[in-house]
Amino acid sequence: MSDEDRKHPDGMSRRDFMKLGGLTVAVPMVVGPTVVQVAGEDVQVFGPGKAPVTLMVNGKKLTAELEPRVTLLDALRDHFDLTGAKRVCDRGTCGACTVLLDGKPVYACSMLAIDAQGRQITTVEALGEPGKLHPVQQAFIDNDAQQCGFCTPGFVVATAAFVSKHPNPTDDQIRRGLSGNLCRCGTYAGVRAAVKQAAGKRA
Amino acid sequence: MSQYSWPEESQRKYIGKSVSRVDGPVKVTGRAKYTQDFNKKGLLYGKLVTCPHAHARVVSVDVSAAEKMPGVKALKVVQGPGKEIHWAGDEVVALAAVSEQVAEDAARAIAIQYEVLPHVVVDETEPPKDIKVASGPVTAEDIEDMFGNQVPLEEIAKALAERGVSTKFTESQLKEYKGYGVPDSIISAMRDAPVREAAAGSKSPYKRTATQQEGDPDAAFQQAATVSEGLYGMPLIAHCCLESHGAVSEWTDPGNLLVRISTQNVSGIAAQMAEPLKVPASSIRVEQQHIGGGFGSKFGPDSWGILSAELSKLAGGAPVKLMLDRRTEQQAAGARPSAYARVRIACDRQGNVTAWDSSSWATGGPTGGGMPPLPYVFKVPAQRKVHTAVLTNTGPARAWRAPNHPQACLITMAALDDAAAKLGMDPLEFFQKNIQLTGPRAKLYAEELNIAAELIGWKQNWHPRTRLTQGHIKRGLGLSLHTWGGRGHESHCDLTIHPDGAVDIKMGTQDLGTGTRTAVLMVAADSLGIPMQQINLYIGDSRYPMSGGSGGSTTIGGVSASTRRAAVDARDQLLAKVAPALKSEPANLEIVDGVVRVKGSTAGGLSWKQACAKIGAMPITVRGNNPDKTKLPDLTNSGVGGVQMADVSVDTETGIVKINKMVAVQDVGLVINEKTAASQVYGALIMGITYSLFEEKVMDPVTGRMLNPNMEFYRLAGLADTGELVVRFMRGPEQDKRGVIGLGEPPVVSPGAAISNAVANAIGVRVPSLPLTPDRVLAALDQPTANATTAGGAL
């Protein structure tokens, strides 16, 4: 398997990263992308000022002027008022910021908003709404898989992605598949039951 | 006369049943707004510059570059030159800017110089045996501490006479102390104490040694058939609330402040902000609909809440969001004190515990840790206890779900478990043998022990420590029991029935995720005889009637009692208005499933809407109170027991502990909502597994810094770490007649002890201190005594 094939879920391969790491060209401080030659290839450089960013969120095109260092999570929360995804650990450990990127769960705190351009982003708000709940959301309510509720949106999104991939999960698959989300109130008993219900296997 | 007592089981549609939480839909869809989620237009982002040192003095603060940065709207030097700082993470400068990025850049542009001072951060080191009891003059704080630590009166008087005071107490001060209940002997000792100058630089981190004695422990130890000895403890841990501490404050006009704050204490915040902000409390409105965890750490506005208001003022009233970043949250926004103890237990030949001797120490920031109530639950006839508080530069301790109880529980139950092992007895049999020492709840504990033993398969799976599982995966069982108070707090609410049939309840309480909203609605619905969906509940606003802070498991008793009284009074007022139309007396009417009718009749009633139309033009509003001696019975009660058992596997090659199963048997009086009550216990077991296996603030003794102020190295248990969990409530008329008792804390007390005992049973040796990490397990296995059935010696 070549490096190119070994793409990360977020689309960056090891080679892409090496390219950026090898950047040696002085970058002028201007707004908007500058194209520089790195290792013989063109690479777009943004910032440090604000740059126009367009995101496809929940089927809608949203635009904002953002500094390139703004994470996808902060863009969603602070600029588009989609506050379902929470900022907790802010460094890719707890999963409270989980959103779907082209259908796959990612930690929105660990991705830059500009890198999420051109991808389909789905937040918890789009999975369902009160009165028209997603089966996973209903299962979380039925099994009381929530207390303070701060980790819940992240868990719901991760679970929705998990059950679509594993319609008949084993206990071990649930343990592994949902270990990327942390809860302080201790709702895992409810979450396990909710996953089984949502996957069509009544707990 | 109105019947305020809890309805009989046959009269309950909701109370005692399993009801999904009413705020579930907004939470699972991400629509629930927490403090962190407020993004009003014009919002400014607050940022703190905190001290990196555990103990330092501020030498200089240069904010000139930051102040000039475009987008910086407010800046305040919180601790200027000369200020002494006692923990890393304490704020020195606060600022607010138009975006988080600008705020970060501004914070980075601030230059602060410190003089670094010596620190104490490590908590497991045993205090020296020959601690010099403080010899400098006694301060008012010392006296309060001595009372807090139950130092005998004659010792307090002696300290005052020998050590003197630095300034003479005035008569008005003494009068004030007398008002607090300080006895005359101490008042006169304070009056007569000589004035002495404090010696400079004589500060010791070890303070306030309490000595207590009951019975004749020396004689008891001499006569003992066996004496078991051990060292037990748990370190300083964080609260690790997922929503960090903080607030969004805005001056809606120059005299009025709106504070959205992450708090367990909506009704109590304004009074705490009024003085520092120099505005009347009535000009401060506090709001919160949802909170992302508190666990005891969010009762005050904290300096951060006050700073958000001050920055807003500096910025012309614009809303300022100041939430702690994860690092500061872990460093400074909450800590459960550590506690360690060397314990000796004496038993007679039959296995009766006859004496207790403990030398304990605890840390927890600038004032030292609290003294755990030792021995826990078991009232041993002869006791001696010595306690030392160790003052550390680790940030102030805060109440952590069941303050002091998990520590006391581990120390006591592990020491008793080791005593059983030394006697060669099954701990279940040993605890049952000594159960009378638990006092009035002995029978209940005995019953709970039997139920838990059945659920975990104690008979089939327990083995003595001398007969371990073959192979390197060792399995063991452990048990523990606990207690808590949980009487309902002061709570008031207004319940209104409108002429169109709408009902609303206003109450200045908060729902921590315990299901408070749902419980209030269930009680109101059962009392009014209508579906809970017909009632609107408004909480989380300081403009509603005061309801106590959510701490000490006091909320459910308080809110359910005030709601019950309000709903019964409102119902009776409604029935009085409706009686003529039904040609009956109010006392002969009832409301069932939203139909007002003559008791027992099935026809000829009025619908709720029709009945409410008889009210007249104005609504009925009544105030419900708790406590309320004019509207008995009490409705709430205090004092629960509870037993937990753990089944673990320990890999003796890697030191990894795995939870196979935990069982919790809990009595809690009348259960309002079975579903959310069970969630409390499941959650407590999981939180307990977390602090038993993973949690500790790792403090670097050299730099004084917390090495894991994050969530990848400050570990919380994940879904894969928790094993099978079984929760069983004691139910039935015996429990119901006790009234409503709080449940938040009790089940989080026992896991540490139950798991530690299970590990000792599995590997044949005690791992003295939590968390039971691989290094600690392997170190315990490496002890020369590892093959004997004794407790570990060193931490």
Image (spheres, coloured by chain):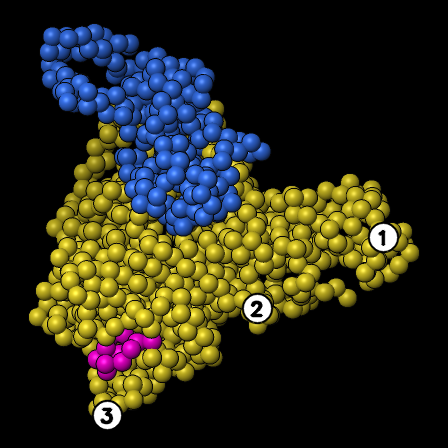
Chain colours: A blue, B yellow
Taking the spot 65% from the left edge, 69% from the top edge, the residue there is B633
Q: Quadrant of residue A16?
A: top left
Q: Quadrant of residue B780?
A: bottom left
Q: Is residue A102 above or below residue B711?
A: above
> Label 1, on which residue?
B603
Seen in the image, is A90 located left or right of residue B521?
left
Taking the spot 78% from the left edge, 47% from the top edge, the residue there is B608
Taking the spot 56% from the left edge, 31% from the top edge, the residue there is A132
> Label 2, on which residue?
B732
Mark nearer the N terminus (2 vs 3): 3
Chain of the residue on which disc 1 is drawn: B
> Label 3, on which residue?
B223
Percent across and percent down for residue B493 are 63, 52
Q: Are marks 1 and 2 on the same chain?
A: yes
Task: Tell me the SS state at disc 3.
Answer: helix
**Amino acid tagged 1:** Ala
Seen in the image, is B496 located left or right of residue A116?
right
Magenta span includes B385: no
Neighbor class of circle 2 (other Cα within 10 Å; few <14, some 14-19, many 20+) is: few
Percent across and percent down for residue B693 are 26, 56
Task: Report the span colored magenta.
Answer: B415-428
Alpha carbons under labels 2 and 3: distance apart: 44 Å
